[in-house]
Image (spheres, rainbow, N blue to C red):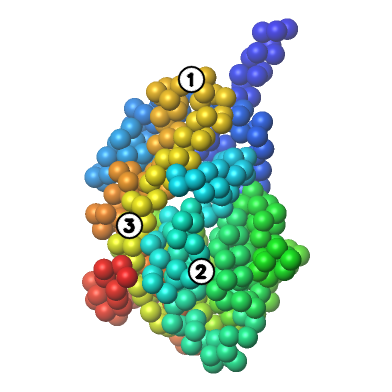
């Protein structure tokens, strides 16, 4: 009897231990569930596989997992990774930065160093300064100011949609501090992220929160899953002034059918002349051709700012905070306390977390330093679609009128990052 119970417990732990693929976008993990998942991870063969570099990317000079945390995109599910991270953020509660400032980890962004005009939106010692700067950099682009002036000035109640809003922290920053009076729909496929959005950022004028509506879209935005509102209904066409995509897992490797479907939905929900603001660190080759893909869908590019240098500086300056956060997790969870910091499981977990944050020395950090990845802020305007556009064909690619090199050089500004 006891043996059967122990076997059943072991099987449960082993199943829960697949942190890379074991959870869905609807998973919400509490404290005990996280303890079980992390214990299962340590009992499974996965940490050893990772540390022996059997899941490392081939033919890319980004080092081995044991040194840089490098691993293949096909080895993990983004839904599972985000479910774990959002669960840990909530379970960790209020932590203390390396500067002694308490905060709750809600900006799940790499971020950039702030520009001189953005610093008015947050304190200099704000632990999540760089994540906030990623959002303020988009919300203060000249195209946004010009659009507001064309529609009645700063009092105009902008309708904003963010696709991939995470915890809604950026939504709250923009609607409460930067674009006041905006009505902001924060849409994310992760139930755990949306739960935090509702808990911390749903509209509450007494607490100084912006007008944010948090929406869980478990299927995301795909060819068969349109943008939805808070009631689960298809969002009306031509209803949004601005759509934001900030550091969301879109076009991580390719511009394919999924990305084309997202672009098509963005076009559908935007008002004529509405703005699409896009910021992320992606392979430089994708940024080179992205404007052509969007032009084929009916977007005119208004600006393109290369802020890669600011993103690298942010990761360098943010390293002490990330180190402090990782150390707090080691002390919080039982399995790490028991096994010790030098155990293969603890080391594998540390590399997973730090690479996700593009921590200095990790694979994703090195991709930015080397130029393989670039961090851009781009603004696009909805215009008329080309006459040959076919709504039923979302996988086509526009025959390039220019070479990739021409597209990259002619549309890029601010190459020093600021």
The residue pinned by badge 2 equals: 121
Q: Secondary structure at mark 1?
A: helix
The residue pinned by badge 3 equals: 313
The mark that comes first in sequence, 3 or 1, is 3
Q: Nearer the viewer, residue 305 or 288?
A: 305
Q: Residues within 10 Å of mark 3 (few under 14, many from 20)?
A: some
Q: Residues within 10 Å of mark 1 (few under 14, many from 20)?
A: few
Q: Secondary structure at mark 2?
A: helix
Residue 177 horizontal/vertical position (percent): 57, 71
Residue visible at 64% across and 48% down in the picture? 192
Q: Secondary structure at mark 3?
A: helix
Residue 400 horizontal/vertical position (percent): 31, 76
Label 2 to label 1, Cα distance in Å?
Answer: 42 Å
The residue pinned by badge 1 equals: 339
Residue 377 horizontal/vertical position (percent): 40, 70
Residue 281 visible in this rendered orientation of the protein: yes
Residue 272 visible in this rendered orientation of the protein: no
């Amino acid at each position: 009897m006891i043996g059967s119970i122990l076997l059943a417990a072991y099987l449960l732990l082993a199943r829960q231990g697949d942190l890379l693929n074991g959870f869905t976008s609807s998973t919400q993990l509490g404290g005990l569930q996280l303890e079980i998942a992390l214990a299962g991870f340590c009992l499974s063969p996965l940490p050893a596989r990772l540390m022996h570099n059997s899941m490392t990317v081939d033919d890319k000079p980004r080092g081995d997992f044991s040194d840089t945390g490098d691993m293949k995109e096909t080895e993990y599910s983004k839904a599972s990774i985000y479910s774990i991270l959002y669960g840990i953020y909530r379970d960790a509660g209020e932590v203390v930065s390396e500067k002694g400032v308490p905060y709750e980890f809600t900006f799940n962004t790499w971020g950039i160093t702030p520009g001189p005009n953005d610093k008015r939106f947050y304190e200099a010692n704000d632990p999540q300064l760089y994540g906030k700067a990623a959002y303020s950099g988009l919300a203060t682009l000249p195209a946004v100011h010009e659009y507001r002036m064309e529609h009645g000035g700063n009092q105009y109640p902008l309708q904003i949609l963010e696709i991939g809003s995470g915890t809604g922290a950026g939504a709250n920053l923009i609607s409460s501090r930067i674009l006041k009076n905006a009505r902001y729909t924060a849409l994310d496929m992760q139930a755990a992220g949306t739960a935090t959005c509702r808990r911390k950022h749903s509209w509450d004028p007494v607490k100084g929160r912006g007008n944010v509506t948090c929406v869980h879209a478990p299927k995301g935005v795909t060819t068969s899953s349109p943008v939805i509102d808070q009631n689960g209904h298809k969002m009306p066409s031509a209803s949004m002034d601005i759509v934001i995509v900030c550091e969301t897992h879109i076009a991580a490797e390719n511009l394919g059918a999924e990305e084309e479907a997202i672009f098509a939905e963005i076009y559908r929900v935007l008002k004529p002349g509405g703005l699409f603001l896009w910021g992320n660190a992606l392979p430089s080759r994708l940024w080179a051709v992205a404007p052509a893909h969007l032009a084929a869908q009916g977007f005119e590019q208004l600006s393109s700012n290369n802020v890669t240098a600011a993103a690298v500086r942010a990761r360098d300056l943010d390293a002490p905070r990330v180190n402090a956060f990782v150390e707090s997790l080691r002390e919080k969870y039982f399995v790490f306390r028991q096994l010790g910091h030098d155990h293969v499981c603890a080391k594998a977990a540390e590399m997973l977390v730090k690479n996700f944050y593009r921590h200095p020395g990790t694979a994703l950090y090195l991709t930015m330093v080397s130029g393989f990845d670039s961090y851009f802020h781009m603004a696009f305007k909805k215009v008329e679609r080309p006459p040959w556009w076919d709504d039923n064909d979302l996988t086509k690619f526009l025959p390039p009128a220019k070479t990739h090199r021409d597209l990259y050089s002619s549309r890029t500004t601010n190459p020093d990052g600021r």
